[in-house]
Image (cartoon, rainbow, N blue to C red):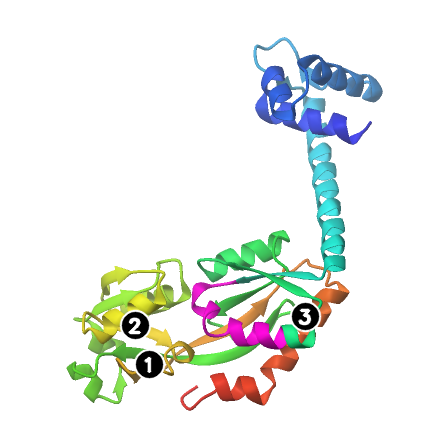
């Protein structure tokens, strides 16, 4: 029994057709037929019911398929792990971030990282939301990612980077700006400008509104943070954003929400991931970086 036979059998079980199986595997149909027949001879079992128009598995074939798929997955995982070792030799960390982090947290982090590890590289990809970052990390496609979380407690595969306020952003020309604290009850008749519906910001704001008995009037959803800020400054609506992305803004003002709305920004890696030496160096760097005065002064400003 070899890997090629298992690959042919699993593909045939999925496609249920010898011709299509051969086409997908880029081999001749007789090669597929011969491999399956050889497998049956070795096992002394009939795996395929050839009396049917379409390929069907016998009971023995169904049982064997479970084992074959497990073996195939194990082999794929092995190749992925070995590929990670090869990438480690090349000094590459695969890193995922949501859009809100890219322009505010990442540049300083990347600069500090390159200063400490000039021979290591970060392969950075932007993803639409934290759930996608976590899925990519769990699958092994990413080594680490930045996520937004409502819970601050750390897990074995999550490191809290910082906790930030999410404040109401409103034009200084609107009546809401004259109040120091604002509840979601006060926002029932306002137009909201939001990120996309799969983001932490959207979900948290939407849930707060529903808890207060209303559906928010959403004027626009966009992936562009700059657009949200500009529209708020132009008095077209309000938004709720983390303070770290609005510290330098002058076209609108921030007002404290009551009860407070928080966001936890965390470093995340796959729960089953075995950390390599390179991974540990990167993790140690992040722990060192978030403890520096440079990071605290830049992000942990008044109101954070």
Gap between marks 1 and 3 measured at Cα: 32 Å
Q: Earlier in the sequence, mark 1 or mark 3?
A: 1
Q: Which residue is mark 3?
A: 282
User: Which of the numbered marks, if any, corresponds to residue 249?
Assistant: 1
Quadrant of res 88: bottom right
Gap between marks 1 and 2 measured at Cα: 8 Å
Whether 132 is among the magenta residues is no
The answer to whether residue 211 shows anywhere in this view is no
Q: Main secondary structure of the magenta part?
A: helix
Whether 112 is among the magenta residues is yes
**What residue is shown at x 28% (from left), y 78% (from top)?**
169
In contact (CB < 8 Å): disc 1 and disc 2: yes
Q: Which residue is mark 2?
A: 229
**Residue 42: horizontal and vertical position, in percent?**
84, 20
Q: Give the quadrant of the N terminus.
A: top right
Looking at the picture, tell me which residue is in the foreground, 260 or 252.
252
**What residue is shown at x 20% (from left), y 73% (from top)?**
234
């Amino acid at each position: 029994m070899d890997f090629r036979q298992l690959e042919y059998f699993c593909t045939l079980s999925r496609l249920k057709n010898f011709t299509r199986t051969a086409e997908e595997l880029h081999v001749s149909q007789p090669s597929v037929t011969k491999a399956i027949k050889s497998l049956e001879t070795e096992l002394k079992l009939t795996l395929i019911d050839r009396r049917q128009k379409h390929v069907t598995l016998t009971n023995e074939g169904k049982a064997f398929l479970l084992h074959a798929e497990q073996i195939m997955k194990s082999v794929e995982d092995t190749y992925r792990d070995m590929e990670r070792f090869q990438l480690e030799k090349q000094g590459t960390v695969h890193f995922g971030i949501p859009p809100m982090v890219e322009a505010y947290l990442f540049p300083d982090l990347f600069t500090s990282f390159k200063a400490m590890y000039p021979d290591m590289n970060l392969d950075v990809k932007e993803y639409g939301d934290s759930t996608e970052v976590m899925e990519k990390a769990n699958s092994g496609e990413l080594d680490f990612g930045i996520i937004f979380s409502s819970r601050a407690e750390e897990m074995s595969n999550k490191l809290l980077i910082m906790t930030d306020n999410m404040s109401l952003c409103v034009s200084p020309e609107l009546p809401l700006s004259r109040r120091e604290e604002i509840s979601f009850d006060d926002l029932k008749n306002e137009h909201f400008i939001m990120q996309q519906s799969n983001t932490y910001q959207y979900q948290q704001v939407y849930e707060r509104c529903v808890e207060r008995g209303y559906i928010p009037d959403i004027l626009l959803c966009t992936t562009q943070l700059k657009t949200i800020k500009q529209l708020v400054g132009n008095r077209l609506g309000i938004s709720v954003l983390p303070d770290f992305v609005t510290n330098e803004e002058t076209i609108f003002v921030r007002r404290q929400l009551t009860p407070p709305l928080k966001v936890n920004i965390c470093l995340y890696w796959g729960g089953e991931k075995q950390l390599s030496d390179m991974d540990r160096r990167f993790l140690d760097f992040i722990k060192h970086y978030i403890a520096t005065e440079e990071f605290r002064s830049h992000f942990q400003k008044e109101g954070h």
